[in-house]
Image (cartoon, grey):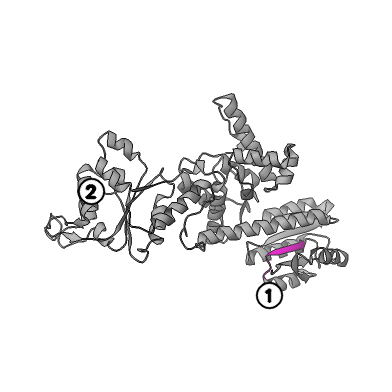
């Protein structure tokens, strides 16, 4: 197995020798003794991991040169994991390095056991980030290129998409606004045999009733005032591909009848036309309403509901997706920071606030808040205020019962400990005064994934 590259930037020969012998079995080592050499080696070899002494020549008594090297490395590769080394009396500069984007710091004299723990954590986190990027790029078969999630509910949705994509059955996607229903529809299309055909969306609630029939089914020249030429509708344009009917619950009853006829016979007539047009396509519909309840109130046709819901996919709200919140937040942070040419990360208090917030606007709201933070923050570490969220410590909650208050407090303590120890189970368990098995049991109880905090 190929070893990961680690660049060791250290001008003290004794420390350099100590680290070389300690790390040679775990890493492919690259060496540098000053800043210019470090940048040159980094440019040539692009190591993922860097061990950087802050006190480098020509100013070994200050952290200036080390900070400069850190800035240069992260400018070239923001995902690099840089662990800075500094003396016991220089903790302030170590913390400043963390704010600039360093992964962690270690104080001299070096405790090799502790230092190796720090490096193992860096390696593990890098692996998780690579897996996450794999999902984003769609390297898992190209099926969910724009959907990110690691909870049981999302894995179940991925499995349903894989199965339903093999056929042409109609799919109904249900979920609150902002949960990513169109992404699910696009994933169904992309995984199907129709992937090379068109994906045609139409929002049934965004078009006036008087225009919606023409938008859906098209019209012939002279069909009504202003119809100066023949025009194909969205249904016809989707032939050979997928038609996505967003907010299907907003469809007027008259058009529900015409849509039902199309689903039954797979033919349409343009407005003002008499020719039946045979079409072959898949239909995916989405709604943030309870269509079954609407059928009982005669607001939605029951026969159309059953035609649409051959397969139903329920998309959970973000507040029920556990630590997917952090996974998604980090994904958006990387994307927006790259667009703005900035190097940013979430602070501990920001991660706590992200986890504690209820996200009424779901993923759309999360995306907007992270985008705002990237633009508004003046620091390299994003805090709750940058996200327009309250710090967890300032949020007051009204418990509905003693049990719910205890569960909430237990959840917050677990989140706090894992955040502080970056997902290290042993350290978190030691701080909380419980055994590792007990802590694992508590994490399962609260649906918390410790890996999300690394």
- Counting from the top left corner in percent of width and height, residue 27 is at 74, 66
- Counting from the top left corner in percent of width and height, residue 223 is at 12, 56
Indicate the quadrant where residue 10 lies.
bottom right
The residues tagged by marks 1 and 2 sit, at their Cα atoms, a distance apart of 63 Å
Q: Could you say which disc has been placed on residue 44 in the image?
A: 1
Q: Could you say which disc has been placed on residue 260 in the image?
A: 2
Q: Is residue 41 left or right of residue 182?
A: right
Dot 1 falls on a residue whose secondary structure is helix
Bounds of the magenta span? 46-52
- Counting from the top left corner in percent of width and height, residue 303 is at 25, 43
- The answer to whether residue 425 of the structure is visible from this angle is yes
Q: Is residue 388 magenta?
A: no
- Give the mark, 1 or 2, whose residue is nearer the N terminus: 1
Indicate the quadrant where residue 78 lies.
bottom right
- The answer to whether residue 342 of the structure is visible from this angle is no
| Few, some or many residues within 10 Å of mark 2 (<14, 14–19, 20+) | some
Marks 1 and 2 in Cβ contact (< 8 Å): no
Image position of 206 with respect to 138: above or below: above
Residue at point 43% right, 52% down?
160
Dot 2 falls on a residue whose secondary structure is helix
Image position of 276 with respect to 303: above or below: below
Q: How many marks?
A: 2
Indicate the quadrant where residue 50 lies.
bottom right
Q: Is residue 48 magenta?
A: yes
Residue at point 31% right, 57% down?
282
Q: Is residue 53 left or right of residue 300?
A: right
Q: Is residue 255 left or right of residue 2?
A: left
Of residue 365 and residue 187, the one placed in the foreground of this image is 187
Image position of 346 with respect to 296: above or below: below
The quarter of the rendered structure image containing the N terminus is bottom right
Of residue 374 and residue 289, the one placed in the foreground of this image is 289
């Amino acid at each position: 197995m190929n070893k990961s590259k680690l660049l060791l930037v250290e001008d003290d020969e004794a420390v350099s020798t100590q680290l070389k012998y300690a790390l040679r079995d775990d890493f492919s080592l690259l060496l540098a003794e000053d800043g210019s050499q470090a940048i040159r080696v980094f440019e040539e070899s692009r190591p993922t991991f860097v061990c950087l002494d802050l006190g480098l020549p020509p100013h070994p008594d200050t952290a200036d040169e080390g900070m400069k090297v850190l800035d240069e490395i992260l400018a070239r590769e923001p995902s690099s994991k840089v662990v800075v080394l500094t003396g016991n009396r220089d903790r302030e500069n170590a913390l400043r390095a963390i704010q600039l984007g360093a992964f962690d710091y270690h104080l001299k004299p070096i405790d090799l056991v502790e230092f190796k723990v720090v490096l193992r954590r860096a390696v593990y986190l890098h692996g998780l980030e690579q897996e996450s990027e794999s999902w984003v790029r769609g390297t898992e078969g190209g099926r969910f290129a724009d959907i990110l999630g690691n909870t049981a509910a999302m894995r179940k949705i991925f499995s349903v998409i894989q199965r339903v994509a093999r056929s042409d059955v109609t799919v109904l996607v249900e979920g609150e606004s902002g949960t990513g229903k169109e992404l699910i529809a696009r994933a169904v299309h992309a995984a199907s045999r129709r992937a090379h055909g068109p994906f045609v969306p139409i929002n049934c609630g965004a078009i006036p009733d008087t225009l919606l029939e023409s938008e859906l089914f098209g019209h012939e020249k002279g069909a009504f005032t202003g119809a100066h030429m023949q025009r194909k509708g969205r249904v016809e344009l989707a032939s050979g591909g997928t038609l996505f009917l967003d907010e299907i619950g907003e469809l007027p009853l008259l058009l529900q009848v015409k849509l039902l006829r199309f689903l039954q016979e797979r033919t349409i007539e343009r407005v003002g036309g008499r020719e039946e047009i045979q079409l072959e396509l898949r239909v995916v519909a989405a709604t943030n309403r309870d269509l079954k309840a609407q059928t009982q109130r005669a607001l939605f046709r029951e026969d159309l509901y059953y035609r649409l819901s051959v397969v139903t996919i329920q998309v959970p709200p973000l507040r029920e997706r556990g630590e997917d919140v952090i996974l998604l937040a980090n994904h958006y942070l990387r994307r927006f920071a790259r667009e703005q040419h900035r190097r940013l990360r979430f602070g501990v208090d920001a991660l706590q606030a992200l986890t504690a917030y209820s996200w009424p606007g779901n993923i759309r709201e999360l995306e907007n808040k992270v985008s705002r933070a990237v633009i508004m923050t003046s620091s390299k570490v994003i805090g709750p205020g940058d996200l327009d969220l309250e710090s967890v410590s300032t949020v007051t909650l009204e418990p509905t019962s003693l049990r719910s208050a205890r569960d909430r407090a237990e959840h917050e303590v677990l989140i706090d400990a894992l955040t502080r120890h970056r997902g290290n189970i042993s350290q978190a368990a030691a701080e909380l005064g419980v055994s590792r098995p007990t802590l694992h049991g508590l994490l399962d109880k609260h649906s918390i994934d410790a890996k999300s905090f690394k």
